[in-house]
């Protein structure tokens, strides 16, 4: 029986090494403050303390912008780590950390990305940090003298011309709150030095990035660091890039003993969250519904450190254009520093926030034009051979199919009242590289891949693909944990790319094995492309993630509580490798989308998280599941399409549009009952106004 | 203090502080299916059966199970029908919450061998799965219904 | 050293012993009933008891009895036992329902009748339900015994009138009124703590409406209970000063109070 069912599965949290100590961290209670003094004299002698002077010579790190240091000074968010301790037990470590006395000089702070762009806003980072030069660098473009660590632009055609040609123009600004990934397993990392060699057992989706960043930080060769990635109890983007690894590595080096850190749930909310965003959309169309121009402005709040905010802002920007044929497009998407905890990769990678705005605006436009929202989309959806706003020619396009399937599932055309639609495109990490090795064993094969297991079933997919290609049973194939010493390079396990990229690399490796002695084979796939950050032209994605959703809702108009009667998602899968796995990914994505739509939002008060626990922050439960269905669209001879995230972004927009069909206009996520009630009141006022005028 | 109990079908004595939660005592015994997750009893990842009823091991002080029967996922046979149903229905993704769901489902089916969909949702509502496997989990429970 | 000494575990086997120990130790020994609330406080490091007075071994406190017309629930009766008890389901259905709606089966297996009252958590379901049913909490000390209605027991946020030498040993519930209803409104997940709860009862003494989860204590205003269901709802919404929390603002709660009180009172009308 699968170890996950029998309870015998082991995660990063379970890692142990002889003689290990446990870490606890001293965190800033202020959102922005200089550390004026640290006094650790009260900490018992048998504990190890990590202070600024221990790490003064270490370099900065960061996956896209090198703006992070092991210990912070100034502290740039509540929860920023200013010191660390290691002790014999977790309880002793926490007690010791409480004995470290820190004095701060507060600095002005800012908590909103639009406010942070005002000329007089406090600067979160005084000096613009170095851009990270690595294979997935996206050409970071900071705006000098501002809190924008990156701006992404699309300039396609001429929007002035496009809007001039429009008969109708609509514009609306939308907001999406921050959210917690809330993986069930918290962040966990264990570091051990042996001479000048560092080994880390860490729950991570990005073993090679982590190794590279640590090597840079410690000024040691990458080969002297080994990152082992045990399966994770969920991640959804939370466990990406350097999180705890730098801290445990430095503590372990000072202690000369292995050091392990496991975050408690409250600290999870101070570690990495989803980008809150403000997205303004303006669309112009002719009377017949043909879109002529679109402008999208995004402010993605990346928090105190950039992390992959530049990438998220980029993806948010182009996903916000939507799967439509629009001759003239302008997008400006900013990743903006604020004094909130850092925001980073979160399932959907920015697409949800802009799809919310873009697809809601389509329904506003449909209402203006008095065309059905379904019909308006049909008239403009990209087809094979059409050019997208990035200049890419679209191939293997299935947006119409997905949209129609979603609409049919809720009988949209029979009666659209209380129903809403959303169709989207999102991209896959481009460029990227995936390599894989296959070795024959006495009983079968070993497949060495750096794709990290977080519940998405990548290990199983590799077993199934390998079995097909090698002509054996899946059970004869062993897929060990990713290990940078023995796994070939992979860019990272994100962006729903693993089955697609590793699958193709595996085919190469099997071909290589067959060409050779049948004992071993190696395969590597490079996925070339990228976008010019100044024009947004180029190749955003070598294949597109395509999907649609439909929702049917009813509203208790006295309390604003929504009941989702039906929820359906149609996702283009190309060719399904692991059917139960693919279904689970769709279902899981939809449920995450449901949470994002209805009740997930991190509440901040002056930079403090006020709902940092799983009672005040609600995750969707089994009893919240509506009548939920989905389908995986396949095509004979198609290649595998990633789908681990595609069904997240369309759910909030479909629900928002369902409410819009009832004349309830929501622009902010989450769609709380309180906000719906306010919309009910607003609708009543509008109607009373219209009545009065009669 | 020493606590005598019946643990996964065998007489056992565990050493625990009086203010130690059952989850810590059980994990020290190597029962790592009991997982610290929310600390508030809302997520169910630390569910264990005490006298066949599910409780949160993170909110139960170790001495409270003195003289009682405690079951964790490790105590289930490979042939356990509920565990098998979860495996066959693919009712899991990362697996972190799965032991808690299996034990909760066992307790539900012991009380209600043929639960309605509503009863299943109510009984499982206190176990969170962030991966979102609820549909297949409900399917697994339905497969076990008589 | 800097790790606290292990607390004393005191586990009496009789109510007399428990009362005597409680009087002897006062608030120095933390009373342990089910442990769900205490567990949260300890996990969050808000409380590190020096001694634990555990009531789990006292069989007498686990009894559900009917004496005359009155229901007597021992302080250590679990929520689950109330929910499942045939006599409570048949003769005090609103109570069985209110207890059955609390949290999850896991919590209900552990949390107790006495514990939930002694915790005085504003968002708990049982206090408002018990108040509407005119229940009394029985407090015993070496000085004797007193039975307090809920509004005299629960004074404020996590604050009760239980003296340091008193132990809550039982809850007594008079006969169930002709009609009673319990409503639990969650503004977010179905599994969320409530935003507004309403316990309503119509019996010999007229209409009673108790609103919970909106203020530090259950809210009842007998003088507002005349008139149509909508009028009662509107008056309660106006009179209560609701708190704001993750489940809703004060203004929002007012709107929900009006609707939910009206719905609760409407459900009490005879259906013929």
Image (cartoon, rainbow, N blue to C red):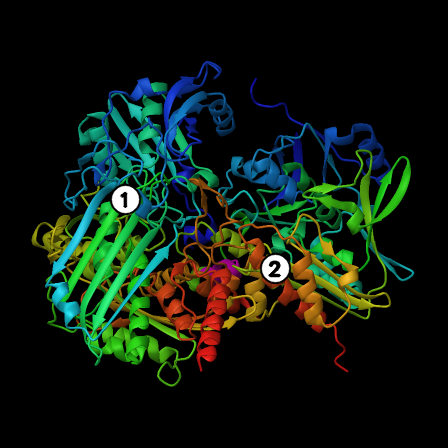
The residue singled out by tag 2 in the image is C254
Residue under the point 16% across and 46% down = A138
Picture quadrant of residue A27 = top left
**Does the image show residue A65?**
yes
Determine whether, in the image, residue C196 is placed left or right of residue A165.
Answer: right
On whether residue B84 falls in the magenta region, the answer is: yes
Q: Name the quadrant of the C terminus of chain C.
A: bottom right
**Where's residue A474, x and y in %?**
29, 58
Residue furthest to the bottom in view is A414
Picture quadrant of residue C20 = top right
Determine whether, in the image, residue C60 is placed left or right of residue A349.
Answer: right
Residue under the point 41% across and 35% down = A78
Q: Name the quadrant of the N terminus of chain C.
A: top right
Over which residues does the magenta segment extend?
B80-86
Q: How much space separates mark 2 and mark 1, taking CA atoms? A: 37 Å
Read off the chain for label 1: A
Q: Nearer the viewer, residue A679 or C208?
A: A679
Determine whether, in the image, residue A465 is placed left or right of residue A234.
Answer: left
The residue singled out by tag 1 in the image is A117
Residue under the point 30% across and 78% down = A374
Read off the chain for label 2: C
**Where's residue B11, x and y in %?**
64, 41
Determine whether, in the image, residue A508 is placed left or right of residue A423.
Answer: left
**Where's residue A686, x and y in %?**
44, 72
Mark 1: give few (<14), some (14-19) or many (20+) Cα within 10 Å.
many
Question: Of helix, strand and loop, which one carries label 1?
Answer: loop
On whether residue C192 falls in the magenta region, the answer is: no
Marks 2, 1 in one chain: no
**Where's residue A52, x and y in %?**
33, 21
Q: Nearer the viewer, residue C210 or A72?
A: C210
Q: Nearer the viewer, residue C84 or A175?
A: A175
């Amino acid at each position: 029986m699968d170890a996950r069912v029998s309870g015998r599965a082991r995660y990063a949290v379970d890692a142990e090494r002889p003689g290990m100590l446990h870490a606890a961290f001293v965190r800033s209670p202020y959102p922005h403050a200089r550390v004026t003094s640290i006094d650790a004299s009260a900490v018992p002698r048998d504990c190890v303390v990590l202070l600024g002077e221990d790490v003064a010579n270490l370099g900065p790190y960061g996956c896209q912008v090198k703006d992070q240091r092991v210990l912070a000074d100034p502290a740039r968010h509540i929860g920023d780590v200013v010191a660390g301790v290691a002790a014999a037990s977790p309880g002793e470590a926490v007690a010791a950390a409480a004995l470290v006395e820190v004095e701060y000089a507060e600095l002005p702070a800012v908590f909103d990305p639009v406010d942070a762009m005002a000329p007089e806003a406090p600067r979160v980072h005084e000096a613009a940090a170095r851009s990270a030069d690595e294979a997935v660098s996206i050409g970071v473009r900071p705006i000098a003298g501002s809190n924008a660590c990156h701006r992404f632009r699309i300039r396609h055609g001429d929007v002035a011309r496009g809007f001039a040609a429009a008969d109708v123009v609509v514009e609306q600004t939308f907001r999406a709150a921050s959210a917690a990934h809330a993986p069930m397993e918290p962040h966990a990392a264990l570091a051990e030095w042996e001479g000048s060699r560092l080994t880390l057992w860490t729950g991570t989706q990005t073993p090679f990035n982590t190794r590279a960043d640590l090597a840079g930080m410690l000024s040691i060769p990458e080969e002297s660091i080994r990152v082992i990635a045990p399966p994770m109890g969920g991640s959804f983007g939370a466990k990406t890039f350097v999180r705890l690894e730098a801290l445990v590595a430095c503590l372990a080096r000072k202690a000369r003993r292995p050091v392990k850190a496991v975050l408690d749930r409250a600290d999870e909310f101070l570690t990495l969250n989803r980008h809150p965003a403000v997205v303004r959309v303006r669309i112009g169309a002719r009377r017949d519904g043909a879109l002529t121009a679109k402008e999208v402005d995004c402010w993605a709040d990346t928090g105190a450190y950039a992390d992959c905010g530049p990438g998220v802002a980029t993806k948010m920007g182009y996903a916000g254009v939507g799967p439509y044929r629009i001759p003239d497009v302008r997008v400006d998407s900013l990743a903006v520093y604020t004094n909130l905890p850092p925001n980073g990769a979160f399932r959907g990678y920015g697409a949800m926030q802009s799809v919310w705005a873009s697809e809601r605006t389509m329904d506003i436009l449909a209402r203006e034009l008095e065309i059905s929202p379904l019909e308006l989309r049909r008239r403009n959806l990209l087809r094979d051979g059409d050019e997208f706003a990035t200049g890419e020619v679209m191939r293997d396009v299935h947006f119409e199919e997905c949209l129609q399937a979603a609409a049919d599932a809720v009988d949209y055309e029979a009666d659209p009242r209380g129903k809403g639609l959303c169709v989207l495109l999102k991209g896959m990490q481009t460029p990227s590289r995936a390599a894989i090795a296959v070795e024959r064993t006495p009983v079968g094969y070993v497949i060495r891949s750096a794709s990290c297991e977080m519940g998405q079933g990548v290990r199983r997919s590799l077993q199934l693909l390998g079995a097909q290609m090698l002509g054996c049973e899946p059970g004869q194939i062993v897929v060990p944990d990713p290990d940078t010493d023995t796994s070939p390079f992979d860019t990272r396990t994100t962006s729903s790319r693993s089955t697609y990229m590793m699958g193709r690399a595996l085919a190469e490796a099997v071909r290589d094995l067959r060409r050779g002695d049948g004992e071993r084979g190696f395969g590597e796939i490079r996925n070339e492309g990228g976008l010019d950050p100044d024009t947004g032209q180029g190749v955003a994605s070598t294949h597109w993630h395509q999907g649609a959703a439909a929702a049917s809702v009813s509203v208790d108009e006295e309390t604003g509580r929504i009941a989702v009667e039906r929820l359906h998602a149609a996702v283009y899968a190309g060719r399904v490798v692991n059917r139960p796995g693919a279904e689970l990914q769709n279902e899981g994505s939809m449920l995450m989308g449901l949470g994002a739509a209805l009740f997930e939002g991190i509440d901040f008060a002056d930079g403090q998280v006020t709902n940092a626990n799983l009672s005040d922050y609600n995750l969707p439960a089994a009893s919240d599941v509506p009548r939920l269905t989905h389908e995986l669209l396949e095509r004979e001879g198609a290649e595998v399409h990633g789908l681990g995230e595609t069904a997240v972004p369309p759910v909030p927009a479909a629900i928002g549009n369902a409410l819009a069909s009832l004349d309830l206009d929501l622009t902010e996520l989450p769609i709380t009952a309180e906000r719906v009630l306010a919309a009910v009141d607003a609708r009543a006022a509008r109607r009373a106004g219209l009545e009065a005028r009669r | 203090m020493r606590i005598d109990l019946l643990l996964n079908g065998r007489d056992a004595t565990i050493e625990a502080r009086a203010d130690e939660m059952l989850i810590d005592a059980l994990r020290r015994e190597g029962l790592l299916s009991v997982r610290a997750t929310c600390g508030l009893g809302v997520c169910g990842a630390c569910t264990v059966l005490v006298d066949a009823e599910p409780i949160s091991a993170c909110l139960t002080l170790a001495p409270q199970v003195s003289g009682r029967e405690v079951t964790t996922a490790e105590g289930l046979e490979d042939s356990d029908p509920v565990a098998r149903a979860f495996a066959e229905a693919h009712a899991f993704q990362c697996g972190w919450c799965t032991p808690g769901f299996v034990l909760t489902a066992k307790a539900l089916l012991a009380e209600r061998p043929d639960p309605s969909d509503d009863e299943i949702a109510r009984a499982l509502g206190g176990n969170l799965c962030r991966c979102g496997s609820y549909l297949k989990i409900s399917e697994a429970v339905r497969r076990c219904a008589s | 050293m800097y790790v606290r000494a292990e607390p004393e575990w005191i586990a009496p086997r009789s109510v007399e012993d428990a009362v005597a120990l409680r009087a002897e130790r006062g608030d120095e020994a933390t009373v342990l009933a089910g442990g769900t609330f205490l567990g949260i406080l300890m996990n969050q490091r808000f409380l590190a008891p020096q001694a634990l007075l555990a009531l789990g071994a006292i069989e007498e406190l686990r009894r559900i009895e009917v004496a005359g017309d009155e229901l007597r629930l021992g302080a250590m009766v679990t929520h689950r036992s109330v929910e499942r008890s045939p006599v409570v389901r048949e003769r005090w259905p609103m109570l069985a329902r209110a207890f059955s709606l609390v949290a999850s089966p896991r919590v209900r297996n552990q949390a107790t009748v006495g514990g939930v009252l002694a915790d005085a958590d504003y968002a708990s379901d049982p206090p408002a339900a018990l108040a509407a049913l005119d229940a009394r909490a029985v407090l015993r000390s070496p000085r004797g015994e007193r039975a307090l209605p809920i509004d005299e027991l629960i004074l404020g946020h996590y604050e009760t009138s239980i003296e340091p030498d008193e132990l809550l040993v039982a809850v007594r519930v008079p006969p169930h009124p002709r009609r009673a209803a319990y409503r639990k409104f969650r503004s977010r997940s179905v599994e969320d703590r409530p935003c507004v709860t309403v316990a309503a009862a119509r019996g010999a003494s007229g209409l009673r409406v108790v609103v919970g989860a909106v203020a530090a204590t259950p809210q009842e205003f007998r003088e507002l209970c005349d008139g149509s269901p909508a009028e009662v709802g509107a008056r309660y919404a106006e009179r209560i000063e609701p708190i704001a929390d993750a489940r809703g603002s004060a203004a929002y709660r007012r709107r929900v109070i009006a609707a939910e009180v009206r719905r609760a009172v409407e459900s009490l009308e005879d259906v013929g």
